[in-house]
Amino acid sequence: MAKEDLRVQRTKKVLKDNFKDMLLNMDYERITIKDLCEKSMINRRTFYLHYDSIDDLMKDVLNDMSLEFSEYTKDYDHFAEPERIIKDYFEFTNANPLYEKLNNNSDLDYIREQLIIKVADQNEFSSLKGVPDDKKIMIKVFVNSATVALYRLWCKDNKRIPMDKFIKDAVELITKGYNYK
């Protein structure tokens, strides 16, 4: 695979960085190619050399975000160490304003769902070898959805409960389900 030209890399980086900044500060639906190009100081034609639409750029940003989280958690099996993945998810998301916004803004649910799918696809739960694929999918969806929902609950409660205690309770609930006390 040929290495991407440095000018192309720089242009894409400027577009993605400015897009993420705009996404943090305004509604996704209000971001226009015209405004993004002005902020990035590039011509609209240059934008269209790299992306077909804002949605296309969003897909590229989501891919980068999922790779960033996957890199952060690559050294262990997420299913075998639920406390570690839940703790990493809370800490990583809490430290990254765009992740925080995607998690807590219900208007962005469809974008967050795309990000969850990308992350789940990039992280293989090696301890699930031998488990049928349909059950693997169910387990991944359950763990991911529960972790995100609990993170949102913690934020909605203004992070009143210390993170470490909330994570401990979240791990107990996710791993023991109804038997959690």
Image (tube, helix red, strand yellow):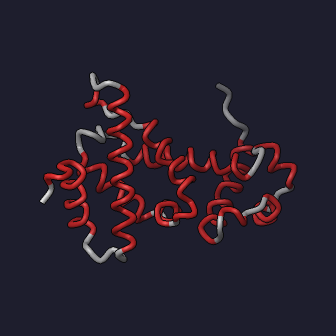
Q: Quadrant of the C terminus?
A: bottom left
> Which percent across, then down, holds residue 165?
20, 66
Q: Quadrant of the N terminus?
A: top right
Of residue 17 and residue 118, the one placed in the foreground of this image is 118
> Which percent across, then down, holds residue 164?
23, 65
> Which percent across, then down, holds residue 116?
47, 47
Is residue 97 something one can see in this rendering? no
* Residue at 30% from the left image edge and 53% from the top image edge: 86
Of residue 109 and residue 78, the one placed in the foreground of this image is 109
In-image side of 110 versus 136 (left or right): right
Is residue 174 something one can see in this rendering? yes
Q: How many marks?
A: 0
* Residue at 52% from the left image edge and 60% from the top image edge: 102
Of residue 131 and residue 85, the one placed in the foreground of this image is 131
When the figure is inspected, residue 9 is found, relative to residue 131, above or below; the finding is below
* Residue at 50% from the left image edge and 41% from the top image edge: 118
In-image side of 8 versus 60 (left or right): right
Q: Residue furthest top?
A: 130
* Residue at 34% from the left image edge and 68% from the top image edge: 154
> Which percent across, then down, holds residue 100?
47, 64
In-image side of 98 versus 37 (left or right): left
When the figure is inspected, residue 6 is found, relative to residue 3, above or below; the finding is below
